[in-house]
């Protein structure tokens, strides 16, 4: 059963302990590294062009996050992505703020043309942009104008167009590989008040993707579901012990991730 596979992935990622290369943004880089460690993988955050190909070569997954763009890191993203493709290393894209600026849009389009992504993890506005829809992106959050878009349709569209897993996170998460569709209803509204939870989710997805091997039963669709479910459940666990505001809640998210196991995942996952 799909649910059983997802639950088993928490044990698998800790057994494999994949090295996850993140070219991410300076707002959330520390949070992403701690989330990766908490779930049982190993982070490395190299972004200089002189070493990204070497670091990617020794990694089990590459996560590209465009949150704080500059021309230097865009060049590094393209080089690392191409190297990962050459070595059949999964690449995850977090197209933060896609649709918000010309430079951001050009970067996303260039990445999608140059790099084959295994998983794209985005909010509905960002994924709608990738699907070719008119969007009203404001910053890094889904705009009210885009909330009416059909998330299932958008996810399936992107998954088929780019031969990838498309994962849209929101109040209800939608994950599709173009044929299969899963929904998740875990999480807490306070997650949206802590910066970096989306970036951490993509880092978690990358961690699980790095644990997918030819020797086990998992695939990147499972990895996307497991990564998103892990953040949602960690948010619920954090809320159950944190009553002092967003600062302590932030710390408890990491604690929640470190506490996750098959039993907790099995009891708490809300998979549809």
Image (cartoon, rainbow, N blue to C red):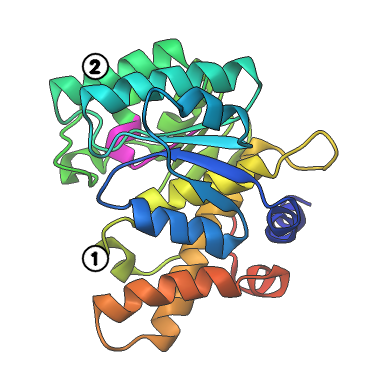
Residue 79: numbered disc: none
Q: Can you give x and y, in whole percent of width and height, for residue 214 in the image?
A: 81, 33
Toward the top, the furthest residue is: 113
Q: Is residue 158 above or below residue 27?
A: above
Mark 1 touches mark 2? (CB < 8 Å): no
User: Circle 1 is placed at which residue position?
Assistant: 193
Q: Quadrant of the C terminus?
A: bottom right
Q: Nearer the viewer, residue 102 or 50?
A: 50
User: Circle 2 is placed at which residue position?
Assistant: 106
Q: Residue at x 85, y 38 (%)?
A: 215
In the picture, residue 74 is in which quadrant?
Answer: top left
Q: Can you give x and y, in whole percent of width and height, for residue 72 in the image?
A: 26, 24
Q: Give the range drawn in magenta.
A: 119-127
Q: Nearer the viewer, residue 158 or 50?
A: 50
Q: Distance between the residues labelled 1 and 2?
A: 29 Å
Q: Which of 214 and 2 is in front in this view?
A: 214
Mark yes or no: residue 14 visible.
yes
Q: In this view, does 233 lie to the left or right of 142?
A: right
Q: Residue at x 76, y 58 (%)?
A: 4
Mark yes or no: residue 182 visible.
no
């Amino acid at each position: 059963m799909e649910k059983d596979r997802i639950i088993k992935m928490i044990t698998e990622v800790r057994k494999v302990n994949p090295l996850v290369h993140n070219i991410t943004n300076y707002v959330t880089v520390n949070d992403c590294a701690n989330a990766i460690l908490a779930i049982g993988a190993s982070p490395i955050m190299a972004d200089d062009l002189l070493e990204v190909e070497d670091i990617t070569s020794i990694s089990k997954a590459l996560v590209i996050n465009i949150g704080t763009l500059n021309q230097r890191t865009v060049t590094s993203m393209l080089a690392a992505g191409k190297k990962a493709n050459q070595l059949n290393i999964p690449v995850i894209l977090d197209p933060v703020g896609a649709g918000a600026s010309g430079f951001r849009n050009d970067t996303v389009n260039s990445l999608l043309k140059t790099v084959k992504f295994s998983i794209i993890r985005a909010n509905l506005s960002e994924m709608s942009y990738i699907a070719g829809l008119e969007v009203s992106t404001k910053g890094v959050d889904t705009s009210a104008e885009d909330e009416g878009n059909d998330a299932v349709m958008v996810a399936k569209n992107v998954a088929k167009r780019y031969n990838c897993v498309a994962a849209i996170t929101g109040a209800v998460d939608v994950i599709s590989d173009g044929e299969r569709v899963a929904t998740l209803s875990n999480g807490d509204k306070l997650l949206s008040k802590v910066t970096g939870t989306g970036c951490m989710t993509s880092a978690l997805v990358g961690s699980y993707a790095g644990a997918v091997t030819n020797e086990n039963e998992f695939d990147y669709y499972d990895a996307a579901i497991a990564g998103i479910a892990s953040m949602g459940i960690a948010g619920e666990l954090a809320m159950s012990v944190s009553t002092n505001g967003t600062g302590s809640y932030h710390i408890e998210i990491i604690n929640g991730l470190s506490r996750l196991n098959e039993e907790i995942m099995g009891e708490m996952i809300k998979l549809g």
